[in-house]
Image (cartoon, helix red, strand yellow):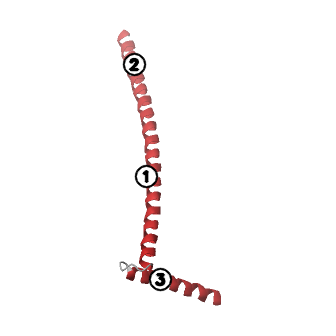
Amino acid sequence: MSELVQIVDSLENKISKLLHKLEILQQANSALENTLEVARNQFDNTNQVVSEWEEKYKSLKLANSMLGSNTNKTEAKLKINTLIRELDHCIAQLAE
């Protein structure tokens, strides 16, 4: 009978240790999830800033080519043609 009590005590001890390890791992997991969320937010913000700067760069490049710079003249002409087509499309829709 005492052997059975020892086995039960041993099992209770092991279960207690496992539950403690589980709690520690859950806390570590929660901390890692928080860190991941912060990193994702920073990544999204950085991507947004990069996109804004790319758009500004494109606009500046286009403005520079429209001011008479020899570089990117064809790109400026293509952009102007695209804008004209968009305007023509808008006028056609208004005329309907």
Give the left or right position of residue 66, taking residue 90 as reference.
left
Q: Which badge, 2 or 3, is on the more N-terminal residue? A: 2
Q: Quadrant of residue 50?
A: bottom left
Please give the label number shown on residue 80. 3
The structure residue drawn at horizontal position 40% and vertical position 17%, both measured from the top left corner, is 8
- CA–CA distance in space, label 2 to label 3: 78 Å
Name the image quarter holding the C terminus: bottom right
Name the residue tied to disc 2.
Answer: 13
Nearest the viewer among 14 and 33 is 33
- Describe the element under mark 2 as helix, strand or loop: helix
Name the residue tied to disc 1.
Answer: 43
Residue type, label 1: Phe
- Describe the element under mark 3 as helix, strand or loop: helix
Report if residue 96 is visible in the image: no
Report if residue 3 is visible in the image: yes
Residue 39: % across, % down: 43, 46
Residue 92: % across, % down: 59, 89
Q: Nearer the viewer, mark 2 or mark 1?
A: 1
Residue type, label 3: Ile
- CA–CA distance in space, label 1 to label 3: 35 Å
Q: Nearer the viewer, mark 2 or mark 3?
A: 3
The structure residue drawn at horizontal position 47% and vertical position 62%, both measured from the top left corner, is 52
Residue type, label 2: Asn
Q: How many marks?
A: 3
Q: Nearer the viewer, mark 1 or mark 3?
A: 3
